[in-house]
């Protein structure tokens, strides 16, 4: 891979999002940054999508941040004019970053933070694993930690996009 200071030549990458139910979705994305323990992908949506009360039209862009050593990932959502729509955190585990793909398991709890600072926690239930006590404790503990830290993480990731000249 052609890599200079973490910024790579545009190259496709597959994001494999696995749900607790066993269902998997695949998204064709482009690398923005790839390092051994970190990655940012860019995805342009072909379909309408909603997160909490936020409805996004086809063509919106997301910059997707992945850290294998963290319990979440983050999608920064922009409309087709480049205006920030929100920051969507997904509680996750089993995050694996490699050159050709990113794989992660969606724990079906999201935190949507709007540009005005308002946020909504979207809890879901996705299959029988939700009833497993250890998983429920893991999810709840990490949700509370994310609620304490989300503003710091948003600032950190904004600075990363600025530093790499992405937005």
Image (cartoon, grey):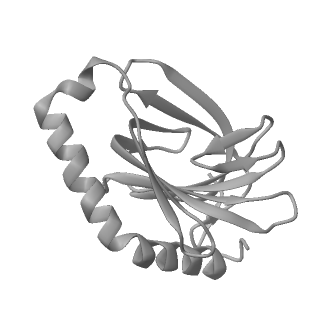
- 118 sits left or right of 110 in the view: right
Q: Foreground residue, 42 or 124?
A: 124
Could you tell me which quadrant the C terminus lies in? bottom right
Q: Foreground residue, 100 or 16?
A: 16
Residue at 67 percent of width and 54 percent of height = 62
- 82 sits left or right of 70 in the view: right
- 4 sits left or right of 57 in the view: left
Residue 23 in percent (x, y) is at 47, 18
Residue at 19 percent of width and 54 percent of height = 141
On screen, 30 above or below 79? Answer: above
Residue at 36 percent of width and 44 percent of height = 92
Residue 36, can we see it? no
Residue 150, can we see it? yes
Residue at 42 percent of width and 27 percent of height = 19
Residue 89 in percent (x, y) is at 47, 55
Which residue extends farthest right? 81
Residue 36 sits in quarter: bottom left
On screen, 157 above or below 23? Answer: below
Residue 145 in percent (x, y) is at 26, 64
């Amino acid at each position: 891979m052609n890599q200079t200071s973490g910024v790579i030549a545009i190259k496709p990458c597959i994001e494999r999002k696995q749900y607790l139910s066993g269902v998997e979705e695949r998204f064709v994305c482009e690398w923005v940054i790839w390092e051994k323990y970190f990655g940012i992908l860019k995805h342009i949506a072909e379909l309408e999508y909603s997160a909490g009360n936020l409805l996004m039209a086809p063509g919106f862009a997301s910059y997707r941040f992945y850290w294998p050593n963290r319990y979440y990932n983050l999608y920064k959502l922009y409309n087709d004019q480049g205006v920030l729509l929100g920051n969507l955190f997904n509680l996750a585990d089993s995050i694996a970053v490699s050159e050709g793909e990113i794989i992660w398991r969606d724990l079906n709890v999201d935190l949507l933070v709007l540009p005005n600072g308002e946020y909504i926690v979207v809890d879901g239930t996705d299959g029988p694993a939700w009833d497993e006590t250890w998983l429920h404790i893991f999810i709840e503990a990490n949700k509370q930690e994310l609620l304490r830290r989300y503003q710091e993480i948003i600032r950190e990731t904004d600075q990363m996009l600025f530093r790499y000249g992405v937005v």
